[in-house]
Amino acid sequence: MYENVKSLDYTKKFLQSDSDPATMEVVTRTNAVKSPTNSPETTKLVYTVKEVAQMLAISQRAAYNLCNSTTEFRVLRAGGSIRIPKDSFDAWLYRAA
């Protein structure tokens, strides 16, 4: 009833032994594997605290403290999550630079 999949060798059945550039180009051209997060239509509307910390080159704790104390840019709180609207933060960062 059950088949031991560890014993089967899927590489010979599904993978080519050598690359065919023509095949690779067709797959690339048709976007056979397209990630929804990497599509150009997807634009971020908010930053996470971790992303803000990375952009400002500060620790996450310092970024949380900044979000809790600032009135310079908007901070959204939903449950336990903190999100910073991109437009508000980018404008603040531009003014500060």
Image (tube, grey):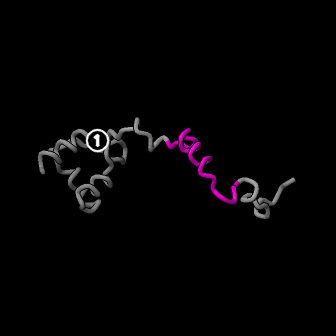
Q: Which residue lies furthest to the right in this view?
A: 1
Neighbour tally class for label 1: few under 14, some 14-19, many 20 plus, Cα within 10 Å: few
Q: Residue furthest top?
A: 41
Measured as percent of width and height from the top left, residue 11 is found at: 72, 59
SS at badge 1: strand
Residue at image position (36%, 48%) is: 80
Q: Which residue lies furthest to the front in this view?
A: 22
Residue under label 1, please give it. 76
Residue at image position (63%, 52%) is: 20
User: In the image, is residue 9 above or below residue 49?
Assistant: below
- The region drawn magenta spans 15-35
Measured as percent of width and height from the top left, residue 91 is found at: 18, 41
Q: In this view, does 91 lie to the left or right of 48?
A: left
Residue at image position (72%, 53%) is: 14
- In terms of image quadrants, where is residue 64? bottom left
Could you tell me the amino acid type at mark 1?
Leu
Residue 67 colored magenta?
A: no
- In terms of image quadrants, where is residue 39? top left
Q: Is residue 64 visible?
A: no
Please tell me which residue lies in front, 36 or 58. Answer: 36
Q: So how many labels did they put on this image?
A: 1
Please tell me which residue lies in front, 37 or 62. Answer: 37
Measured as percent of width and height from the top left, residue 65 is found at: 22, 56
Residue 22 colored magenta?
A: yes
Q: Is residue 40 visible?
A: yes
